[in-house]
Image (cartoon, rainbow, N blue to C red):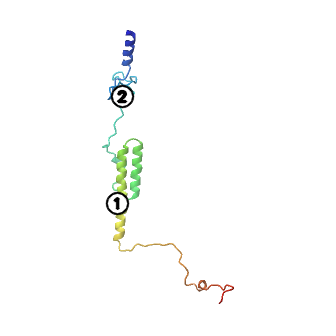
Amino acid sequence: MKHQTNHLSSSNASRCRHYTINGRRCRLPVLDTRSGLCFRHASPPPAQSDSEDLSAELLPQLSEFESAADVKQFLARLLVLVTKGRVTPRRAAVLAYITNQLLHSHSAFSRENREQDDQPQQIVIDLPRPKRDDPLQNELPDRPGQPS
């Protein structure tokens, strides 16, 4: 029996010292002997910060979004940062929503400007007009069996 308890204590020494919230011990082998933790718990991944300043990457030449092309360029840069893991999906969703609102405000602004112009809106209908003034078309050819 003593042999088995020694075996258990030696296996416990080679196990990770991290305990879960439920009180269970991690079963992975120790990676770092100084800390006594496995590869998962020795160096946890750095938490992404939603407050990191990314204006240099997202807005290098843009100061104001004056056109849809500026918004498109911003969204392309945002996509690159999301795929690299520099921006959280939640933060990207908020930024994309804001750019969507900018696009809507641009279209509303342009509609207001058009309404303020003194020029009436030009409506273009691309249909051929009927030829009503053509005398040959008004005359029907004589048909046999009909009185003239």
In the drawing, does residue 140 fall left or right of residue 10? right
Would you identify the image quadrant in which residue 134 lies?
bottom right
Residue with the mark numbered 2: 41
| Residue 60 in view | no
Front residue of this view, candidates 12 and 47: 12
- The residue at the point 41 percent across, 54 percent down is 72
Front residue of this view, candidates 24 and 87: 24
Cα separation, mark 2 vs mark 1, equals 48 Å
Q: Which mark is residue 105?
A: 1
Work out whether 30 lies above or below 137.
Answer: above
Would you identify the image quadrant in which residue 29 lies?
top left
Hey, what amino acid is under mark 2?
His
- The residue at the point 38 percent across, 44 percent down is 89
In the drawing, does residue 70 fall left or right of residue 136? left
**Local secondary structure at mark 1:** helix
Front residue of this view, candidates 135 and 73: 135
In the drawing, does residue 7 fall left or right of residue 131? left
Hey, what amino acid is under mark 1?
Ser
Of the numbered discs 2 and 1, the one sitting upstream in the chain is 2
Q: How many marks do you count on the picture? A: 2
Q: Pointer 1: residues within 10 angstroms few (<14), some, or many (20+)? A: few
Work out whether 138 lies above or below 42.
Answer: below
Work out whether 112 lies above or below 97.
Answer: below
Q: Position of residue 82 (x, y in %)?
A: 40, 44
